[in-house]
Image (cartoon, rainbow, N blue to C red):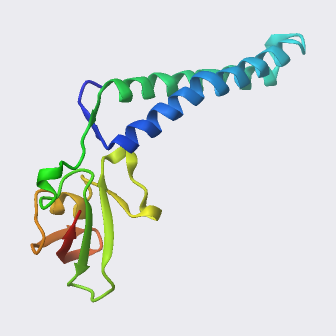
Amino acid sequence: MSEKLQLTKEGLKKLQDELEDLRTTRRREVAERLREAIGYGDLSENSEYEEAKNEQAFVEGQIIELEQKVKNAQVIGQSKSSTDMISLGSVVEVENLTIKEDKKKYTIVGTTEVDIAHDKISNESPLGSALIGQKKGAVVNFETPGGKFEYQIIKVS
Protein backbone atom coordinates (compact mmCIF):
# COMPACT_ATOMS: atom_id res chain seq x y z
CA MET A 1 0.00 0.00 0.00
CA SER A 2 2.04 2.95 -1.24
CA GLU A 3 -0.91 5.12 -2.28
CA LYS A 4 -1.64 8.05 0.02
CA LEU A 5 -4.63 7.54 2.28
CA GLN A 6 -6.61 10.75 2.63
CA LEU A 7 -7.88 11.33 6.15
CA THR A 8 -9.13 14.12 8.33
CA LYS A 9 -7.10 14.95 11.44
CA GLU A 10 -9.73 13.15 13.54
CA GLY A 11 -9.55 10.07 11.30
CA LEU A 12 -5.77 9.85 11.67
CA LYS A 13 -6.08 10.20 15.45
CA LYS A 14 -8.63 7.36 15.50
CA LEU A 15 -6.26 5.10 13.50
CA GLN A 16 -3.34 5.97 15.78
CA ASP A 17 -5.43 5.23 18.90
CA GLU A 18 -6.55 1.88 17.47
CA LEU A 19 -2.95 1.01 16.59
CA GLU A 20 -1.76 1.90 20.10
CA ASP A 21 -4.52 -0.27 21.63
CA LEU A 22 -3.51 -3.23 19.45
CA ARG A 23 0.19 -2.80 20.25
CA THR A 24 -0.35 -2.60 23.98
CA THR A 25 -3.61 -4.03 25.33
CA ARG A 26 -4.52 -6.61 22.66
CA ARG A 27 -0.97 -7.98 22.31
CA ARG A 28 -0.76 -8.40 26.09
CA GLU A 29 -4.18 -10.15 26.21
CA VAL A 30 -3.19 -12.58 23.44
CA ALA A 31 0.18 -13.29 25.08
CA GLU A 32 -1.63 -14.14 28.33
CA ARG A 33 -4.02 -16.47 26.48
CA LEU A 34 -1.02 -18.20 24.88
CA ARG A 35 0.68 -18.66 28.28
CA GLU A 36 -2.50 -20.18 29.72
CA ALA A 37 -2.96 -22.49 26.73
CA ILE A 38 0.66 -23.68 26.91
CA GLY A 39 0.04 -24.52 30.55
CA TYR A 40 -2.61 -27.06 29.50
CA GLY A 41 0.11 -29.36 28.19
CA ASP A 42 0.24 -31.24 24.87
CA LEU A 43 0.18 -28.55 22.16
CA SER A 44 -0.62 -30.96 19.32
CA GLU A 45 -4.22 -31.43 20.52
CA ASN A 46 -4.67 -28.15 22.36
CA SER A 47 -7.53 -26.17 20.76
CA GLU A 48 -7.06 -23.23 23.15
CA TYR A 49 -3.45 -22.94 21.97
CA GLU A 50 -4.49 -23.05 18.30
CA GLU A 51 -7.15 -20.38 18.85
CA ALA A 52 -4.70 -18.14 20.70
CA LYS A 53 -2.08 -18.55 17.93
CA ASN A 54 -4.71 -17.67 15.30
CA GLU A 55 -5.77 -14.63 17.31
CA GLN A 56 -2.14 -13.58 17.66
CA ALA A 57 -1.66 -13.81 13.88
CA PHE A 58 -4.84 -11.77 13.33
CA VAL A 59 -3.78 -9.04 15.77
CA GLU A 60 -0.29 -8.84 14.24
CA GLY A 61 -1.86 -8.57 10.77
CA GLN A 62 -4.08 -5.72 11.95
CA ILE A 63 -1.06 -3.95 13.44
CA ILE A 64 0.86 -4.20 10.16
CA GLU A 65 -2.15 -2.94 8.19
CA LEU A 66 -2.72 0.03 10.52
CA GLU A 67 0.99 0.89 10.56
CA GLN A 68 0.88 1.11 6.75
CA LYS A 69 -2.25 3.26 6.83
CA VAL A 70 -0.72 5.65 9.37
CA LYS A 71 2.56 5.76 7.43
CA ASN A 72 0.73 6.58 4.17
CA ALA A 73 -1.80 8.96 5.73
CA GLN A 74 -2.22 12.35 4.16
CA VAL A 75 -4.15 14.67 6.45
CA ILE A 76 -6.55 16.80 4.49
CA GLY A 77 -8.36 19.59 6.25
CA GLN A 78 -10.64 22.41 5.35
CA SER A 79 -8.48 25.45 4.73
CA LYS A 80 -9.76 28.72 6.16
CA SER A 81 -9.56 30.52 2.82
CA SER A 82 -11.57 28.01 0.81
CA THR A 83 -14.54 27.12 2.97
CA ASP A 84 -16.81 27.87 0.01
CA MET A 85 -15.40 24.97 -2.05
CA ILE A 86 -16.23 21.43 -0.89
CA SER A 87 -13.26 19.21 -0.07
CA LEU A 88 -12.36 16.43 2.33
CA GLY A 89 -13.37 17.55 5.81
CA SER A 90 -16.13 19.88 4.62
CA VAL A 91 -19.51 19.84 6.34
CA VAL A 92 -22.14 20.21 3.65
CA GLU A 93 -25.84 20.90 4.02
CA VAL A 94 -27.83 19.63 1.04
CA GLU A 95 -31.40 19.37 -0.11
CA ASN A 96 -32.59 16.36 -2.08
CA LEU A 97 -34.45 17.80 -5.07
CA THR A 98 -35.43 14.36 -6.37
CA ILE A 99 -37.25 13.24 -3.24
CA LYS A 100 -38.50 16.22 -1.30
CA GLU A 101 -37.21 15.66 2.24
CA ASP A 102 -35.64 17.59 5.10
CA LYS A 103 -32.22 19.12 4.50
CA LYS A 104 -29.31 16.93 5.59
CA LYS A 105 -25.79 17.73 6.75
CA TYR A 106 -22.91 15.45 5.76
CA THR A 107 -19.22 15.53 6.57
CA ILE A 108 -17.03 14.47 3.64
CA VAL A 109 -14.36 12.04 4.87
CA GLY A 110 -11.88 9.50 3.49
CA THR A 111 -13.01 5.92 2.94
CA THR A 112 -11.62 4.64 6.24
CA GLU A 113 -13.61 7.19 8.26
CA VAL A 114 -17.10 6.52 6.89
CA ASP A 115 -19.76 6.47 9.61
CA ILE A 116 -23.26 6.65 8.14
CA ALA A 117 -24.84 6.78 11.62
CA HIS A 118 -23.01 10.08 12.20
CA ASP A 119 -23.55 11.39 8.63
CA LYS A 120 -19.91 10.95 7.58
CA ILE A 121 -19.82 9.97 3.91
CA SER A 122 -16.89 8.97 1.74
CA ASN A 123 -15.38 11.28 -0.82
CA GLU A 124 -15.58 8.25 -3.14
CA SER A 125 -19.31 7.59 -2.59
CA PRO A 126 -21.69 8.70 -5.36
CA LEU A 127 -22.88 11.73 -3.37
CA GLY A 128 -19.45 12.51 -1.91
CA SER A 129 -17.69 12.46 -5.28
CA ALA A 130 -20.46 14.61 -6.81
CA LEU A 131 -20.02 17.20 -4.04
CA ILE A 132 -16.20 17.44 -4.09
CA GLY A 133 -15.08 20.67 -5.77
CA GLN A 134 -18.58 22.21 -5.78
CA LYS A 135 -19.73 25.42 -4.10
CA LYS A 136 -22.78 26.64 -2.23
CA GLY A 137 -25.80 26.92 -4.52
CA ALA A 138 -24.63 24.31 -7.01
CA VAL A 139 -26.95 21.51 -8.09
CA VAL A 140 -25.28 18.11 -8.45
CA ASN A 141 -26.58 15.00 -10.20
CA PHE A 142 -25.34 11.52 -9.41
CA GLU A 143 -26.39 7.92 -9.79
CA THR A 144 -26.61 5.20 -7.15
CA PRO A 145 -27.85 1.62 -7.33
CA GLY A 146 -31.17 3.09 -6.09
CA GLY A 147 -31.49 5.49 -9.02
CA LYS A 148 -30.56 8.99 -10.16
CA PHE A 149 -30.61 11.88 -7.70
CA GLU A 150 -30.34 15.65 -7.81
CA TYR A 151 -29.17 17.61 -4.74
CA GLN A 152 -28.70 21.31 -4.16
CA ILE A 153 -25.88 22.54 -1.94
CA ILE A 154 -27.34 24.83 0.71
CA LYS A 155 -24.33 25.50 2.94
CA VAL A 156 -20.61 24.62 3.10
CA SER A 157 -18.55 24.91 6.28
Residue lying at 25% horizontally and 24% vertically, measured from the top left? 2
**Number of marks in the image?**
0
User: Which residue lies most toward the right here?
Assistant: 40
- Which corner quadrant of the image does residue 125 belong to? bottom left
**Residue 20, placed above or below residue 102:** above
135 left or right of 40? Answer: left
**Residue 94, placed above or below residue 28:** below
User: Which residue lies most toward the bottom here?
Assistant: 100
50 left or right of 118? Answer: right
Residue 51 placement (x, y as % from top left): 73, 26
Q: Front-most of 106 and 83?
A: 83
136 left or right of 118? Answer: left
Residue lying at 24% horizontally and 80% vertically, measured from the top left? 95
**Residue 130, placed above or below residue 140:** above
Residue 56 placement (x, y as % from top left): 64, 21
52 left or right of 5? Answer: right
Q: Which image quarter is the C terminus in?
A: bottom left
Residue lying at 24% horizontally and 74% vertically, measured from the top left? 94
